[in-house]
Every structure is written in C-alpha cells, then in structure tokens.
Image: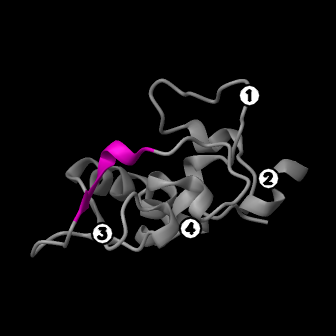
Amino acid sequence: LPLDRPYGRPTVAQDYANEDPPLPGTQRTGPDLSNVAARQPSDTWHLLHLYNPRAVVPKSVMPGYPWYFEEKAEAAPGDVVVPVPPRLVSAKGRVVVTRPEASALVAYLLSLRQPERPR
C-alpha cells in the first residue's frame, strides 16, 4: 500500500499468525508497529517519541506520555537521561529521566520485528 512505503515493508496476513487473538484492526492512524524495531532501532528515538512525539516527528498526531518520565535538577547514578530539547523541558537546567515503565515499553517496542518477506 502507498501508506506503508515510508515505513518499510507492508503488513501481510502472516504477521498476525503469532498474535492470540489477532488484532489487525480496521483503521490505522500511524505506522504499523509490528515491525517498528526494524525501522527505528534506537532506544533514544523511542524514548523521545514517547515523551513528546513532535520532538522527532514534527507533524505527529500521537499524544505524549510524559508520566513515563520524571524531570529532575540532575540525574542520579543509574538514571537513563533522555536528550529532550531544552525548549520541551518545563524549567531551564532540568533533565528528563525515564521511569521503569518507559524503559519497559521501549524494550517491548524494540522486540517488534517481523522477518523479511521472500521476494
């Protein structure tokens, strides 16, 4: 489909074979996530996208999920700092760090990879 061209290979019926129950849906407002790790393999990209989608996709209609993150005056040892542009942080000099839920969600997204289709 032309809609799939910017996102890599299109979804095919076999992609739903491992879902129980299969959830193909009837309408899509964004790219198919079943192969998102092949298109966007960066954990940093996904963390930014979750915090504020327009930080990486200016025309995105996806809502942000800022509750998966915390703003701090400075990062603590072991914190995963997200390189959020300063204009998107609520106060000057603060850093954005992940909460465990954000890291778990990104790990899941990075596990979504479909095998290449034979040509």
Mark 1 residue element: loop
Q: Looking at numbered disc 2 in the image, what kind of residue is underneath it?
A: Asp
On the picture, is 46 further left or further right than 31? left
Q: Is residue 71 magenta?
A: yes
| Callout 4–callout 2 Cβ contact below 8 Å | no
State which tag comes first along the sequence, 4 or 3. 4
Q: Residue at x 64, y 64 (%)?
A: 116
The answer for how far apart the CA atoms under marks 3 and 1 are is 37 Å
Residue assigned mark 4: 40
Is residue 114 visible in this depiction of the protein? no
The answer for how far apart the CA atoms under marks 4 and 2 are is 15 Å
State which tag comes first along the sequence, 3 or 1. 1
Q: Can you tell which of label 2 and label 3 is closer to the viewer? A: 3
Q: Residues within 10 Å of mark 2 (few under 14, many from 20)?
A: few
State which tag comes first along the sequence, 2 or 3. 2
Residue assigned mark 2: 4
Residue 35 position in % (x across, y down): 58, 56
The answer for how far apart the CA atoms under marks 1 and 2 are is 13 Å
Mark 3 residue element: strand
State which tag comes first along the sequence, 4 or 2. 2
Which range is magenta?
A: 65-72
Q: Is residue 83 above or below residue 47?
A: below
**Residue furthest out toward the left:** 77
What is the number of the mark on residue 95? 3
| Callout 4–callout 1 Cβ contact below 8 Å | no
